């Protein structure tokens, strides 16, 4: 198993985003802004779903890699770190998914009334 991680990818994205290399897809995507990065994230999400529904293991793997990459670019642009996302996932897994989702819905409903 490789030592490569989402944190490693996060670092590569941060470096390339500010590196000024005109041949870097990351630099081009970041300079195009959030709208383009979010659009690419959405495209990759759809392509991942299509590959999964087609039961295409290699395609699903490849599209999932694209999806994770583009998600990390969007997170970079928003200033959200992988560790923050992992902390949120850890917080959510401290209870059952159904209870956690219900609590979020109750919180959302009460803020809508305020």
Image (cartoon, helix red, strand yellow):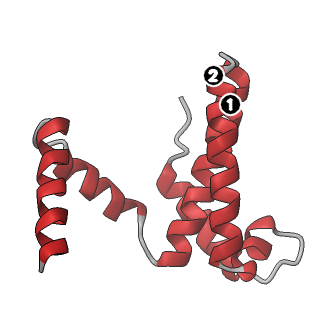
Residue 50: which disc?
1
- In the rendered image, the vertical position of residue 8 relative to residue 15, given as above or below: above
* Label 2 residue SS: helix
Give the residue drawn at x 69%, y 27%.
Answer: 51
Give the residue drawn at x 26%, y 57%.
Answer: 88
- Among the 4 quarters of the image, the one containing residue 42: bottom right
Where is residue 71 drawn, in percent x and y? 56, 57
Asked if labels 1 and 2 touch by Cβ distance under 8 angstroms, the answer is yes
Q: Residues within 10 Å of mark 1 (few under 14, many from 20)?
A: some
Q: Is residue 6 left or right of residue 102?
A: right
* Label 1 residue SS: helix
Q: Is residue 55 left or right of residue 6?
A: right
Q: Residue furthest front?
A: 113
Q: Residues within 10 Å of mark 2 (few under 14, many from 20)?
A: few
Q: Residue furthest right?
A: 23
Q: Which residue is mark 2?
A: 53
Where is residue 53 drawn, in percent x and y? 63, 22
């Amino acid at each position: 198993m490789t030592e490569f991680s989402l944190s490693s990818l996060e670092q590569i994205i941060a470096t390339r985003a500010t590196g000024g290399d005109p041949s870097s897809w990351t630099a081009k995507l970041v300079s195009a802004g959030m709208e383009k990065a979010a659009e690419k994230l959405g495209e990759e999400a759809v392509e991942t779903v299509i590959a999964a529904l087609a039961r295409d293991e290699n395609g699903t793997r490849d599209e999932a890699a694209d999806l994770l990459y583009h998600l990390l670019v969007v997170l970079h642009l928003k200033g959200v770190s992988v560790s923050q996302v992992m902390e949120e996932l850890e917080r959510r897994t401290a209870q059952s998914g159904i209870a956690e989702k219900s609590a979020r819905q109750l919180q959302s409903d009460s803020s809508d009334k305020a």
